Amino acid sequence: MKSIAVLGFLALLLLDSPSRAQDRQAARVVLESTKSATIAPRVSFPQTRFRLTKKRPRGLKAPALTADARYAVVKSGARSITLGFDAPGGAFALGLLYTGRRPVTGRARTDQAEGTMMVDFRDVAAGGTRIDVRLFYKGLELREAILQPAYHRRGKVALAGAVRELILVDANGNGRYNDPADRWIALRAGARRSGSLRGPAAALLSEPQIPFRDDGRAFHVEKVAPDGSAATLVLAPATKSLKEVLARRYAEVRRAHFRRFRREAAVFATKHDLTGPRVKKPAGWLRLTLNEAKRRAKEARKPLLVFYFAETNVASYRYDYYTFPDKEVDALLRRFVLVKIDTEKDPEASYGRSGARLLPALIPYDKDGDKLEFKLMHRRPNGDVDNLVEPESMVSGWQRPQEFSVNLKRIVIASR
């Protein structure tokens, strides 16, 4: 009897082995430090704030710049990077950054809530490394400049039916990529990257990447080479719960951002003229997937408004605190089926296919589930107003109640 029981147990193991094998998939990834495979791994700079001055340093090889140019020598230990920043014709929004003879053109974007503008210079070759440089403007005044390592180690591999780009980040700038504090992320090939991937959105080496799949599997990294030249990308059951991973991310975000959010709250309402009448109990938002939301809107014969957010995104909270409780906004919101989708917990991962450029994003649909096209009102930090048809029919980023109510009225008209 004992032998029969043993044989039965072995038979069950054999029957179960194919499904167990399918639970885990792995692929080795060869990683490069830059876009060129011929360039050897290079030591990163840690994130560094610096000041730009009008005195030109000796080490800059750039040609003669304009009288308005500014310069900096950024040092870390025995290493240094010499920078020159120029804005021909006063076009500081698209300024030029020199670390050698050829300039790199900046990319500008505004932050409506803060009234600031950021100019990014991405993946710049400098001082034996590759860096990102970000400049912060308040009006026409340059307030802050930051140098940080570029993404650095990346490579592509086919896994789980799609090509993935694996990125390793030397978070502490010590030249190694296998420290507990270092970061990683695996993106679908061609997906838009955000920032330098040094922040909470990128997983620690010990963590699985979120969102997890419906079957409980998630991407992991294993066998990370100290120099970042190779790693193994794995799709397997999550080693930590979603709750554990998000708790770490939320803690980091609160340390980095929410202190500022609380500090600004006292003056934010006055600064942005948020003194209009408010409701005591704002309209409720359902927590559904996009497909479920469309079904609900079709059943209710009402247009749908989807609010994509993340609990690690400060601007998402500004809507909850300042915009949604506004009396006029609330009355308009009640004409829709309202659905919030947490981008970090969405099993359908619909935000990635939405075309949204940043969080939070509000996307309207008609009662049949088709995107609504409307003319978006957008107020620049200098007060100018643009009226344009968004290619993806959405509101991205935070808006004051005044602008948001105008856009809601336009969406209501478009839904008729």
Image (cartoon, grey):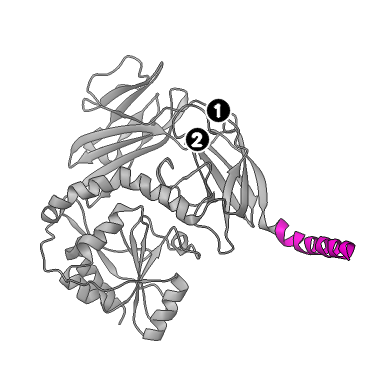
Residue for point 20% across, 71% down: 329
Magenta part of the chain:
1-21
State the residue position of label 1.
41
SS at circle 2: loop
Task: Say which quarter of the image contains residue 303.
Answer: bottom left
Which x, y percent locates residue 59? 36, 16
**Magenta stretch mostly in which secondary structure?**
helix
> Where is the N terminus found, in terms of image quarters?
bottom right
Magenta stretch contains residue 4: yes
Which x, y percent locates residue 244? 46, 52
Q: Amino acid at mark 2?
A: His
> Where is the C terminus found, in terms of image quarters?
bottom left
Q: Choose the circle earlier in sequence order: 2 or 1.
A: 1
**Labelled disc at residue 152:** 2
**Labelled disc at residue 320:** none
Question: What is the number of callouts on the image?
Answer: 2
SS at circle 1: loop
> Looking at the image, do the residues carrying marks 2 and 1 touch, with CB atoms under 8 Å apart?
no
Q: Amino acid at mark 1?
A: Pro
Q: In the rendered view, would you say 172 is above or below 139?
A: above
Pointer 1 local density, CA inside 10 Å: few below 14, some 14–19, many at least 20: some
